[in-house]
Image (cartoon, coloured by chain):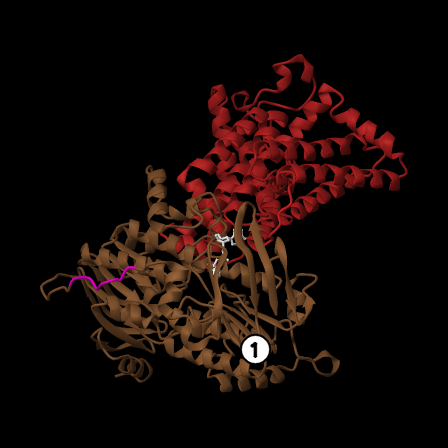
Amino acid sequence: MEARGVTCRFGDKVAVHKASVRLFPGQIHALVGENGAGKSTLLKAMAGAVVPTEGEVWIRGQRLDPATPAEAIRRGVGMVYQHFALVPSFTGMENLMLGVEPVGLLGWLRPSVTRARAEEIAAMTRLRVHLDVPAASLSVGEQQRLEILRVLVRGASLLLLDEPTAVLTPGEAQGLYELLRRIAKQGAAVAVVTHHLEDVSRYADQVTVLRGGEQVFQGAVSEVTTAELSLRALGEIPAVKRPTAVGGEAPELLVVVGLQAEGLDVKELRVRRGEMVGIAGVDGNGQEALVEALAGLRPARGSQRLGGCELAGAPPSARRAAGLEVVHGDRHRFALLAGATIHDNLVLGDLGPDEEAKVVRRMAVSGLIPADPSLQAGTLSGGNQQKLVMARALDRAPRMLVAAYPTRGIDAAAAAQIQQRLVAAAEGGAGVLLISGDWSELRTIAHRLLVMRKGRVVAELPPDVREQELGRVMLEGS
Amino acid sequence: MSEAVSRPSLPPGVRRGVWSVVVVLLLFDGLAFLAGEAPRVALLKALEGTWGTMYGLGQVIYKATPLLLTGLGFRVALRAGLFNIGVEGQLLLGSFAAGVVASRLPSSTPWPLGVLMSLGAAGVGGAGLGAVAGAMKVKFGAHEVIVTLLLNRIVEALVPYVLRRGVGVTGYRSGDAISGALLPRLEQLSEVFRGSAASLATVLALVVCLLVLRWERSSVTGREFGWVGLGAGVCEAQGIPGGRRLWQAMALSGGRAGLGASATVLGYKGYYELGLGAGAGFGGIAVAMLGQGSAVGLVGAALLLGTLQQAGLVLNASLPREAMDVLTAAVLVAASAGRGRR
Ligand SMILES: Nc1ncnc2c1ncn2[C@@H]1O[C@H](COP(=O)(O)OP(=O)(O)O)[C@@H](O)[C@H]1O
Ligand SMILES: [Mg+2]
């Protein structure tokens, strides 16, 4: 498969400029670059989902024509999008079958065919997904895995994955790359967009670096080091340091006792002023339930006190007034109106007389690209959407910040910036509860780590715990 | 799916407007032909009877007035993501309430006060009905289309019953409004509208239209309504009371629809009778869809539908009455098609 001099414009905006990428059977090709560099757009062009303004896409020596997703799929292209394309009310199985329903005599549906294939692939790849519950009830991580499984079940031989590991734990990501390697060995060509540059060095064969839509580097992974890649893709990244340690005399800010909700049973959780508490765990072990319960979006029993003020049963607006701010992991469900402008999203939930000032300020700290508040938020790349959400949350100057996966899907430079701001918030006296799937993030900036498993906090570990130990506790409990 | 190459084109509002007029003209010709009329003759006759004379124009304006108000009513719910089929029933209840209050006020009630109280009753009647549907949605998750559809039927059955049970002077109408509750006809202001049913209600509707559109853009609640329509869950999580906004939007929707009574009960008949203003609720759906967010669009859409209704009366002899209903429905379909073509 080959993209030849592909240029994609959206109005005046050049998202990709004269990019040429060749994918070979048996190889994994990594696409890297900062948020908004044009990686998704280039991938979509190769999948027929975006029609290039200039340039062409060739598959096995033939031009992709018409340039439509249907034609691309027919030619064996399988794309996993950054934003899930699952039918929420359908079960995993139904989502797998959708569009490629195996039918037998008289048009009877034969789910067993798909199931057998899915189970075979799942076993081979160690992808764990519940296939018999609605997709909506799966965690973000599981939904992502279901997406990947779906493309594989369809037997695609040209795999395009847009940030597939963004929502996976490091262990799962490794499993995925091993799987991609196996698929490649069987003759498939694979392209992966990722922000994890170490993964590129470790698992990919070829790499293309995009910056501002321009292709600034292309070559074999063996030719470059991770540090060089990072420099080319992102420029210098400042190191982030843990907030200053808080002593035992620092007052407790958030005190949660006996918190029980669907999928959640937390005996006790305390965060002091100025403290950064990390929550680690395999995705889908109650992290979302915890965040939703704390946000007042999921009915819960038990006490949740913030600075002495009982929040149990209070709606989100009352919690906000008490100084609690929650950044949700699922942006589209809880944080961002894709159909509204960036301007409106920046002040969503706190309209007031100083609206213009807020927009200017939040726009400036977010570092959004493009920096035009009149655009629809849905046109921003995923990382930029996350920057918007974080800028809004931090500008509300919360006393207590609950941040779920705040840097997921964000390039390393922007991630470092957000981590720096979380650290600054803690040093300014706020309590921070950081839920993350990024071990190095947790180990770098949290004061202590709580490990969640099956809805419970099963262990407390120091941040300098060995990775192996952390992984073991996450899987087995203490 | 994104489109990398964008074609230069007319603003969507203009395209939709032109599109609906073309559809109307084509269908009109077809219907006239089927009814055995020469299309050109029928068209000229229709134009003559609507925009050709001041009287005809007055009639068009009269018909367009409740349509504009129900259209504004439908719109507020639509922005909040709700499909308020109930505007028809809300208009009915509002008209009934206006008729009853206007006839039962002490006859000494001075002019603007009587009007305001009757209009208040119309608004409260419509709003109450809308609020019921909104509360059902928020509290029990009942779908607003089903609930409002059922409420329409209930009100349609209940109003005649209540009238017969002594609330009205006869079984089918309310008492006459006191003079302090009437809106002056336009013919009282200018000779040219002589005989037409248009009244100050039209001016009122225009003012409401401008205020409403401004409110949508610049008030906190107005803007939040639109946001809730884009994602109630997101709004809730960000501290906007999504549930409350939903039922408020339904109440406001019903209230505005109820104000349609100003043209019929207070501006024209001077009492409520069964069937007065019927159909203006459903017409309002087309007005909102066609007019989208602009005052020009909404007023234009209301005038288009008003013209169709008046043309139906003019062509009464040669075309079946239902022909104009078919046209109205066609406009609705065209309007919805235009929405999807963004
Ligand atoms: N549908 C669209 N309309 C307008 N601009 C878009 C659209 N899709 C992407 N863009 C812009 O193109 C640029 C590249 O986006 P994208 O390919 O999503 O970046 P990323 O490298 O983060 O995946 C960004 O500046 C983005 O805002
Ligand atoms: Mg992207």
Percent coordinates x, y for residue B321 in the rendering: 78, 38
Q: Residue under label 1, please give it.
A: A152
The reply, left or right, for residue A210 in relation to residue A77 is left
User: Residue at 44% of width from left, 60% of height from top?
Assistant: A333
The reply, left or right, for residue A192 in relation to residue B291 is left
The reply, left or right, for residue B187 in relation to residue A231 is right
Q: Which residue, as the protein is rendered here, is positioned at the far front? A: A223
Residue A60 in view here:
yes
Percent coordinates x, y for residue A478 in the rendering: 25, 84
Q: Is residue A149 above or below residue A423?
A: below
User: Residue at 38% of width from left, 50% of height from top?
Assistant: B240
Q: Which chain is brown?
A: A
User: Residue at 19% of width from left, 54% of height from top?
Assistant: A428
Residue A243 in magenta? Answer: yes
- Camera-side residue: A237 or A372? A237
Percent coordinates x, y for residue A56 in the rendering: 64, 60
The boundaries of the magenta stretch are A238-244
Q: Tag 1, which chain? A: A
- Residue A101 figure quarter: bottom right
Residue B34 in magenta? Answer: no
- Of the chain colours in the picture, the one used for chain B is red
Q: Is residue A227 above or below residue A376?
A: below
- The kind of residue on which mark 1 rests is Leu
Q: Which residue, as the protein is rendered here, is positioned at the far left? A: A249
Q: Is residue B133 above or below residue B219?
A: below
Secondary-structure class at tag 1: helix
